[in-house]
Image (cartoon, rainbow, N blue to C red):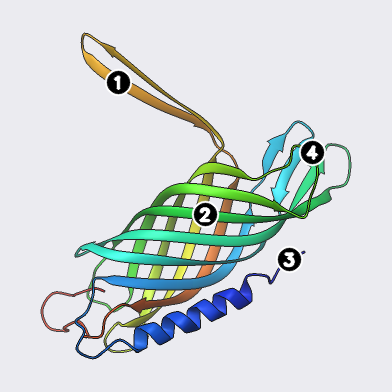
């Protein structure tokens, strides 16, 4: 089972991001953007099929996020998440068995709302929408191929500064990952105007916890006088 395939790329990416952030020239003003990298644990992901229940084995996941400040207490977010796992099937009346390895990717965009108080820690909530890509590995079974589904992520977390200027922060997160494999859109118009609907079937639901670093893309520390200023 590929439990550690994502570790080395994540470490290399974290080191590279840290070098870039700390090598920024001192004359560069603070930028309203930040890069986050993390590692964690993801579980869940079951789905009923005719033969039984498919489920993804719990395993390590890694990810990254590029955030842009769009308001004093809000960020626009670009997000990617990767999990190497193994797909299993629980067949009715029989022991479960492993089918094949699978990579799960989430490519998302959305926003983060911060709760700004007098303390230095920053609690926040996140809502993202995008696509989940389920990519089987090492199988030649007929009819087995990659699947892309509409997805959304709901999460909450907290950032804790490591220094006086908030440039480097620890972040701790919990998230729910929802997918919709089947959906439909309808629209109609009448004398009273037009209306539309969207419907879908909820697919695999996953949960994750993670910890990582957030690096502000800039060099000037935020002022500690007056209203709080966030990176």
Q: Earlier in the sequence, mark 3 or mark 4?
A: 3
Residue situated in front as seen by the camera: 144 or 207: 144
* SS at mark 2 in the image: strand
Q: Earlier in the sequence, mark 1 or mark 2?
A: 2
110 relative to 60 in the view: left or right: left
Give the quadrant of the C terminus: bottom left
Say if 41 sits above or below 47 in the image. Answer: below
Q: Distance from label 2 to label 3 (Cα)?
A: 18 Å
Q: Earlier in the sequence, mark 3 or mark 1?
A: 3
Q: Which residue is found at the position 65% from the left and 45% from the top?
A: 146
Other-residue count near label 2 (Cα within 10 Å), few / some / many at <14 / 14–19 / ≥20: many
List the residue tagged with mark 3. 2
List the residue tagged with mark 2. 106
* SS at mark 4 in the image: loop
Other-residue count near label 3 (Cα within 10 Å), few / some / many at <14 / 14–19 / ≥20: some
Q: Position of residue 121 (x, y in %)?
A: 33, 76
Q: Earlier in the sequence, mark 2 or mark 4?
A: 2
Kindly check if marks 3 and 4 are in contact, taking CB atoms under 8 A apart as contact: no
Kindly check if marks 2 and 4 are in contact, taking CB atoms under 8 A apart as contact: no
Q: Distance from label 1 to label 4 (Cα)?
A: 42 Å
Q: Position of residue 67 (x, y in %)?
A: 33, 65
Q: Distance from label 3 to label 4 (Cα)?
A: 23 Å
List the residue tagged with mark 4. 142
Give the quadrant of the N terminus: bottom right
Q: Which residue is found at the position 49% from the left and 47% from the top?
A: 131
Say if 13 sits above or below 136 in the image. Answer: below
Q: Which residue is found at the position 42% from the left and 28% from the top?
A: 198
Q: Distance from label 2 to label 4 (Cα)?
A: 25 Å
* SS at mark 1 in the image: strand
């Amino acid at each position: 089972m590929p439990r550690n395939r994502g570790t080395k790329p994540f470490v290399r990416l974290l080191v590279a991001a840290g070098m870039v952030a700390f090598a920024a020239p001192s004359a560069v003003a603070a930028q309203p953007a930040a890069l986050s990298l993390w590692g964690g644990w993801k579980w869940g992901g079951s789905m009923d099929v005719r033969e039984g229940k498919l489920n993804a084995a719990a395993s390590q996941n890694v990810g990254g996020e590029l955030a842009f400040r769009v308001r004093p207490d809000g960020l626009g977010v670009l997000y990617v998440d990767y999990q190497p796992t193994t797909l299993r099937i629980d067949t009715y009346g029989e022991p479960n068995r492993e089918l094949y390895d699978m990579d799960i990717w989430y490519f998302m965009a959305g926003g983060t709302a911060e709760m700004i108080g007098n303390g230095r820690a920053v609690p926040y909530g996140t809502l993202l929408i995008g696509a989940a890509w389920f990519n089987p590995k090492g199988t030649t079974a007929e009819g087995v191929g990659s699947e892309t589904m509409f997805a959304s992520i709901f999460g909450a977390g907290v950032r804790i500064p490591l220094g006086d200027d908030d440039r480097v922060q620890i972040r701790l997160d919990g998230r729910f990952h929802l997918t919709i494999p089947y959906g439909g859109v309808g629209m109609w118009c009448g004398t009273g105007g037009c209306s539309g609907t969207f419907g879908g079937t909820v697919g695999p639901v996953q949960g994750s916890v993670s910890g990582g670093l957030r690096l502000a893309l800039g060099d000037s520390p935020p002022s500690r006088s007056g209203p709080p200023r966030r990176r």
